[in-house]
């Protein structure tokens, strides 16, 4: 089983950015290969990692629904799906990438989803780390896209609303009895010093702050210029903050 890293939180707070910078750290510190999953149907992790033309797992599920009754003799659904999954997986140096996307068809994908889960469970055993960037909010918990994690990062901006959203996610994870070993906040876009009120609010919710990330103009520049965050500079304050936070978590 890999060490599962899940990233969650309110919309637009920096989940995808954090995921990309964590992956950058894993690759550069030789901890790869990581299995990276963009679980956000409207996600842009591929873009943040400089990947183009990525096909989604959702599209395979659609195809499977259409072709289920016409598979060539001797080809099982499992086998077909496994082959397709290998086709849409983007293999890169230090990581493999899958985008979940969303099935467009009207049907229920319950069966295919079960098969998919089984294949994914086997697949992830090949990796020391898995990293999942989730859609904003809580649907990934209620739909059990996130079922287990060694660490669940709740990303919040430097605001009360961000902390409240993150705390609701932590509460739901607990209610659903998901196997989440550790959960805590990452306060992103901190302007200079973090306001003590943010810490107070987090502690009132019985949660911890795992790290803070400064507001940084280079992040925006990379985004505008379409550059991969995997090439983000080593001496940048965001890179440094993420490295320090992740290193502490991995040794504890
Ligand atoms: N530390 C930071 N400093 C400056 N800008 C940042 C920082 N972190 C993220 N951003 C910017 O904030 C915007 C939102 O970030 P990102 O896409 O990572 O958020 P998200 O939580 O994944 O959003 P969504 O909920 O839409 O998936 C992006 O334009 C990103 O460049
Ligand atoms: Mg995102």
Image (tube, rainbow, N blue to C red):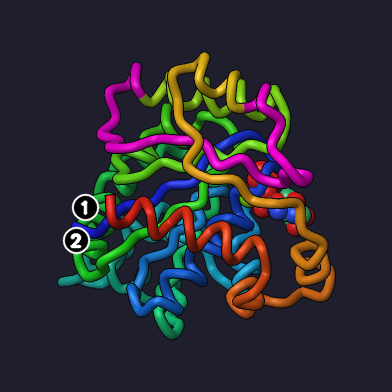
- Where residue 84 sits: x, y (%)? 37, 71
How many numbered circles are shown? 2
- Where residue 190 sits: x, y (%)? 72, 44
Q: Give the secondary structure at mark 1.
A: helix
| First to last magenta residue range | 174-198
- Horizontally, is 50 left or right of 102 in the view? right
- Where residue 89 sits: x, y (%)? 42, 73
Badge 2 is on which residue?
A: 122
Task: In the rendered view, tell whether residue 221 sits above or below residue 184.
Answer: below
Let me know if residue 23 appears in the view.
Answer: yes
- Horizontally, is 146 left or right of 165 in the view? left
| Nearer to us in this view, 119 or 212 | 212
Badge 1 is on which residue?
A: 118
- Residue placed furthest toward the bottom: 93
Q: Say which quadrant the N terminus sits in.
A: bottom left
| Residue 131 counted in the magenta span | no
Q: Give the secondary structure at mark 2.
A: helix
């Amino acid at each position: 089983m890999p060490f599962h890293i899940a990233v969650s939180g309110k919309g637009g707070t920096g989940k995808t950015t954090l995921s990309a910078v964590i992956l950058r750290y894993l690759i550069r510190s030789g901890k790869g290969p990581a299995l990276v999953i963009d679980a956000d149907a409207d996600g842009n992790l591929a873009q943040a990692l400089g990947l183009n033309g990525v096909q989604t797992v959702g599209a395979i599920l659609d195809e499977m629904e259409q072709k289920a009754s016409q598979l060539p003799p001797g080809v099982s659904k499992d086998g077909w799906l496994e082959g397709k999954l290998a086709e849409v997986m983007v293999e890169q140096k230090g990581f493999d990438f899958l985008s979940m996307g969303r099935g467009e068809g009207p049907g229920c994908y319950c069966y295919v989803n079960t098969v998919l889960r089984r294949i994914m469970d086997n697949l992830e055993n090949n990796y020391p780390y898995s990293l999942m960037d989730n859609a904003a909010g809580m649907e990934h918990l209620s739909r059990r896209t996130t079922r287990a994690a060694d660490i669940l990062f709740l990303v919040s901006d430097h605001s009360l609303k961000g902390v409240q959203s993150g705390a609701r996610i932590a509460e739901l994870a607990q209610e659903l009895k998901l196997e989440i070993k550790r959960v805590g906040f990452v306060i992103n876009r901190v302007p200079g010093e973090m306001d003590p009120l943010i810490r107070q609010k987090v502690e009132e919710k019985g949660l911890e702050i795992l790290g803070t990330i400064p507001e940084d103009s280079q992040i925006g520049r990379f985004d505008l210029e379409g550059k991969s965050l995997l090439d983000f500079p080593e001496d940048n304050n965001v890179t440094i903050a993420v490295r320090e936070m992740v290193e502490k978590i991995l040794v504890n």
